[in-house]
Every structure is written in structure tokens, then in C-alpha cells.
Amino acid sequence: MRLGVVEYMDAAHYLPGHETCGKMHGHTYRVELVVEGEKGETGMVMDFYEMKSILKKALAEYDHRCLNEVVDYPSVENLCEAIYNKLLGEITLPFKVRIWEGKGKWCELGDL
């Protein structure tokens, strides 16, 4: 069974050397966390509140920041990898992270 939660964050960045994205600009990122597992004794795979809390904590470092200050070359791929790695120690079930950079563009990383 799979469960998912969604959070949002806003951040600015620029991609050095990129023709159009080399200038400072911002995005609203939609960040999806999906876990997979079997229902436990509680009748749940994982509590939604716990999932959202873990995700919010992982995003706090990036929200309302210039991503260039916290991620080397802050492409959506590198941001997704950084957030995924933060969640590795917090979530014991198989999971994936999908990050939407604005509308129509996303990156996904995970076990599912």
C-alpha cells in the first residue's frame, strides 16, 4: 500500500553558466513524499501527521532561501537528491520524493 503527502516551499536560485536560468529567479516547489508498506497494528502504514512533520523538517533548510547558499549547483535534480538524503535517516519504509519545479517539471528519486 502507498501513502503520500504534499508540502510546498518557495526558494530562489540561479544555475551558473546556464543561458536562461543563470539569472536569479524563484520557484514554488511542490514536494511529494510517498511511502510504501503494510498496515500495522494501528491500521495505518504510517501516520500522515508524522509524514508531514518529517517532510516539513527536511524542507526547512531550503524554504525561503537562495538555494545556491545550501546546494552546490541547485538544479532540481541536486535539490531532490539533497532532500531525499535528509529523509533517509528519518523514514524506515521504502519511499520516494518527487519535486515539482513550478508547473510541468519534476524530478523523482526513491525506492518505489
Image (cartoon, helix red, strand yellow):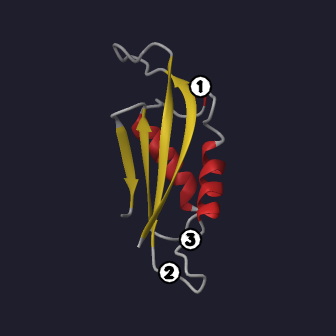
Q: Give the residue pinned by disc 3.
A: 46
Q: Which mark is residue 66?
A: 1
Q: Which mark is residue 39?
A: 2
User: Circle 1 sits in a helix, a strand or a loop, which is it?
Assistant: loop
Q: Which mark is residue 53?
A: none
Crowdedness near tag 3: few (<14), some (14–19) or many (≥20) residues, C-alpha within 10 Å? many
User: Circle 2 sits in a helix, a strand or a loop, which is it?
Assistant: loop
Amino acid type, mark 1: Cys
Q: Is residue 98 above or below residue 71?
A: below
Q: CA distance from mark 2 to mark 3?
A: 8 Å
Crowdedness near tag 2: few (<14), some (14–19) or many (≥20) residues, C-alpha within 10 Å? few
- Where does residue 88 sit, x and y in percent of width and height? 54, 60
Amino acid type, mark 2: Lys
- Where does residue 53 sit, x and y in percent of width and height? 66, 56
- Where does residue 24 sit, x and y in percent of width and height? 50, 15
Crowdedness near tag 1: few (<14), some (14–19) or many (≥20) residues, C-alpha within 10 Å? some
Q: Is residue 92 above or below residue 18?
A: below
